[in-house]
Image (cartoon, rainbow, N blue to C red):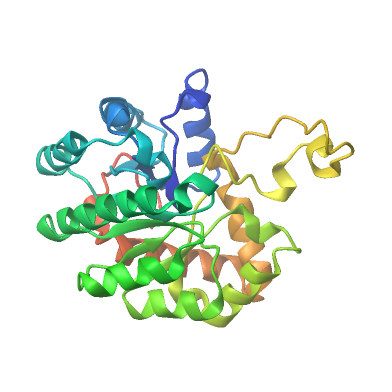
Amino acid sequence: MFDTHTHFDVVDFDLDRQHLATQAKASGVEALVLIGFLAERFDCLLDIHQQINGWKDAPQSFLAPGLHPFYIEQHQTSHLLQLEQMLRLQDCVAVGEIGLDTFLKQHKQPEQFQRQQQFFAEQIELAQQFDKPILLHIRKAHAEVLAQLKRQRFHLGGIAHAFSGGVEEAKALVKLGFKVGVTGQITNPNAKKLHQVVQALGAEHLVIETDCPDMTPLCCQSLDQQRHQDPQHPQQRTRNTPVNLGCVLAGLAQSLALNRETLEAMLWQNSLQALGLDDRHFTANNLTIQ
């Protein structure tokens, strides 16, 4: 399995990262992508990436640095130069996660949203300059993202991470060369919109991800969290980890009524295609599948 979107570098994993990486590898996770979101974390992102690839029994790590739209207030023009340097000097598989996000009220304000669009456009240009796919973050801005991609004639594809749009929006992204990223939400029978999307697209256009430490599959959450007994006192979230990717696969297999092993093989190939990889990108030490 290929975990196409993780934040496995964040402090949530500092105490047990190697243990979890070993567990993930043992559960069938052969590769993962470390996603960038703030320029100030690029050095840490690279350090963790190198650590993971130095461990014997761990998934192979790939880098995807980017400037996340949710943190637009923190981004500076100089950070785009840092991103360009990262892409120039390091072996990065994609630019991400980038996109548009109007989930919060302040991000809907014209000035903030215009800034998001500016940083998104600049990062699309960098992806084109370095011939990289992009990993899209989209919340309540699907039409605007599609318009931007078409305006800049982006043709390198990538992944629409943690997809939350509808069927027509998903089909539009597929038409532009993107795969659709499916998270632990697929294990929730009440996520009807997501189930409709994956069933309409079919397995050939999908990849899976944990988006750890968030998006914990329903079956991996604590009982207290599932019950939501007191909305005024929400329980602490259950940390998601790459170990849970198998639960995402199982949930997707159930939604698509497909054999798990058949789906697993398809998703692996989809992931390689979306990220411009092939078997030559995997070291003999890390890759165990035949």
| Visible residue check, residue 280 | no
Q: What residue sits 76% from the left and 63% below the top? A: 190
User: Seen from this angle, which residue lies furthest top?
Assistant: 15
Relative to 135, say whether 80 is above or below: above
Instruction: Give left or right: position of 63 versus 189.
Output: left
Instruction: Give left or right: position of 167 versus 143.
Output: right
The quarter of the rendered structure image containing the C terminus is bottom left
Q: Quadrant of residue 180?
A: bottom left
* x and y percentages locating residue 211 in the rendered image: 50, 46
| Of residues 202 and 176, the one drawn nearer to the viewer in this rendering | 176
* x and y percentages locating residue 267 in the rendered image: 46, 65
| Visible residue check, residue 88 | yes
User: Seen from this angle, which residue lies furthest right?
Assistant: 229
* x and y percentages locating residue 195 in the rendered image: 65, 71
Relative to 60, say whether 56 is above or below: above
| Of residues 39 and 133, the one drawn nearer to the viewer in this rendering | 39
Q: What residue sits 10% from the left and 57% below the top? A: 129
Instruction: Give left or right: position of 39 versus 228.
Output: left
Q: What residue sits 58% from the left and 59% below the top? A: 249
- Total marks placed: 0
* x and y percentages locating residue 176 in the rendered image: 32, 76
Q: What residue sits 35% from the left and 56% below the top? A: 135
| Of residues 26 and 42, the one drawn nearer to the viewer in this rendering | 42
